[in-house]
Amino acid sequence: MTRKPTTRATQLGRRLGLLGLAALLLAAPACHSYRLPNPKGPPQPKVKKGTTPGNESADGRALDVEREAVKTQKNSYDKNGLLKKPKYKRRHLKHKDRNRKILGITLPF
């Protein structure tokens, strides 16, 4: 049994065929149709809102203790709209007090 000698044209044809098949397999996932999701989202059950008395907890049990008014802390803001608290001082702009140096070289800004 002797093998038929392959020519350069048949080798090129095989390589192009394999290359085309590989390109088709790689491009197939990128070409699938994509369904846009519903902007409303999934249907949600409707919840009836009832009037709850002030001394009832979230699970519906009545509380023995009368509700007291909760005092909230009022925030004060500066002219830039930042909170006036020590925690937020680092948000303010820092003024340059001397020239900056990197590796011993003084920078002009």
Image (cartoon, rainbow, N blue to C red):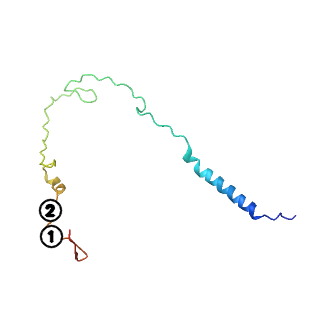
At label 2, which amino acid type do we have?
Answer: His
Spot the residue most to the bottom: 104
Q: Is residue 20 above or below residue 49?
A: below
Q: Nearer the viewer, residue 22 or 109?
A: 109
Compared to 69, does 108 lie above or below? below
Residue 80 higher or lower than 63, as above or below: below
> Which class describes the residues within 10 Å of circle 2: few (<14), some (14-19), or many (20+)?
few
- Disc number at residue 95? 2
- In the image, what residue occupies the spot 34% across and 25% down? 47
Quadrant into which the C terminus falls: bottom left
User: Could you tell me residue 76's position as x and y percent?
Assistant: 11, 45
Query: Image quarter for residue 41?
Result: top left
Q: Which residue is mark 1?
A: 98
Q: Amino acid at mark 1?
A: Arg
Q: Residue 86: horizontal and vertical position, in percent?
A: 13, 54
- Residue 89: % across, % down: 15, 55
User: Which residue corresponds to the image point at 18% horizontal and 28% vertical from the top-left?
Assistant: 64
